[in-house]
Image (tube, rainbow, N blue to C red):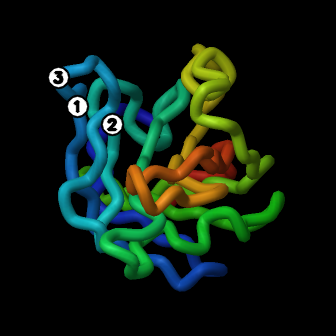
Amino acid sequence: MPASAPSRLTIPSLGVSTSLERLGMDAKQAMQTPRDPAKAGWYQLGPTPGEQGPAVIAGHVTWNGAQAVFFRLAQLKPGQRIDVARADGTTAHFTVTKTAQYAKDRFPSIEVYRNLDYAGLRLITCGGTYTQADHHYRDNIVVYAQLASPAG
């Protein structure tokens, strides 16, 4: 699909439907996280969903002890659908291929962000054990998906 900014992410099996913030890099040269815990964010320095390469959408799992937009993300299974509505009026339909959990200090950046010869999607949130003392999750959850079909 040609480049077109995403406007909405829908995950039918989880009951998720969210508009998308635009994310860039923070002062530490890491991907920003969404400001609103009820919304996910698209990493605008990468491909758009439906375009060749790994489009990345991130969201919070919790915020101040409450469930956030990606609270149930780890429950996604291979074969389930993710839809991304785009500014050009099309929707990119993705199929989940894998859900994985990684320790933050062993995050596989190359596997997650590497060049692809197809249109891929990566959904990223925190997971694993939460440490109250430093308000930090030890792991990340990454959902891998591949473009199934575009639609008008």
Residue 52 location in percent, x, y?
53, 26
Q: Quadrant of residue 62?
A: bottom left
Mark 2 lies on residue? 43
Q: Nearer the viewer, residue 120 or 110?
A: 110
Residue 24: give its label.
Answer: 1
Mark 3 lies on residue? 27
Would you say 85 lies left or right of 130 here? left
Which residue, as the protein is rendered here, is positioned at the far front? 133
| Amino acid at pointer 1 | Gly
> Going 39% across and 77% down the picture, which residue do you hit?
65
Residue 16 location in percent, x, y?
48, 78
Proximity of marks 2 and 1: CB atoms separated by less than 8 Å? yes
> Going 60% across and 80% down the picture, which residue do you hit?
14
Of badges 3 and 2, nearer the viewer stands 3
Q: Quadrant of residue 132?
A: bottom left
Upstream in the sequence, badge 3 or badge 2? 3
Q: Quadrant of residue 40?
A: bottom left
| Amino acid at pointer 2 | Tyr
| Amino acid at pointer 3 | Ala
Upstream in the sequence, badge 2 or badge 1? 1
The 10 Å Cα crowd at callout 3, few under 14, some 14 to 19, many 20 or more, is few
The 10 Å Cα crowd at callout 2, few under 14, some 14 to 19, many 20 or more, is many
Q: How much space separates mark 3 and mark 2, taking CA atoms?
A: 15 Å
Q: How much space separates mark 2 and mark 1, taking CA atoms?
A: 6 Å
Task: Look at the image and tell me whether residue 152 can be seen.
Answer: no
Q: Nearer the viewer, residue 141 or 152?
A: 141
Residue 80 location in percent, x, y?
74, 67
Q: Is residue 79 above or below residue 33?
A: below
Q: Secondary structure at mark 1?
A: loop
Which residue, as the protein is rendered here, is positioned at the far right? 78
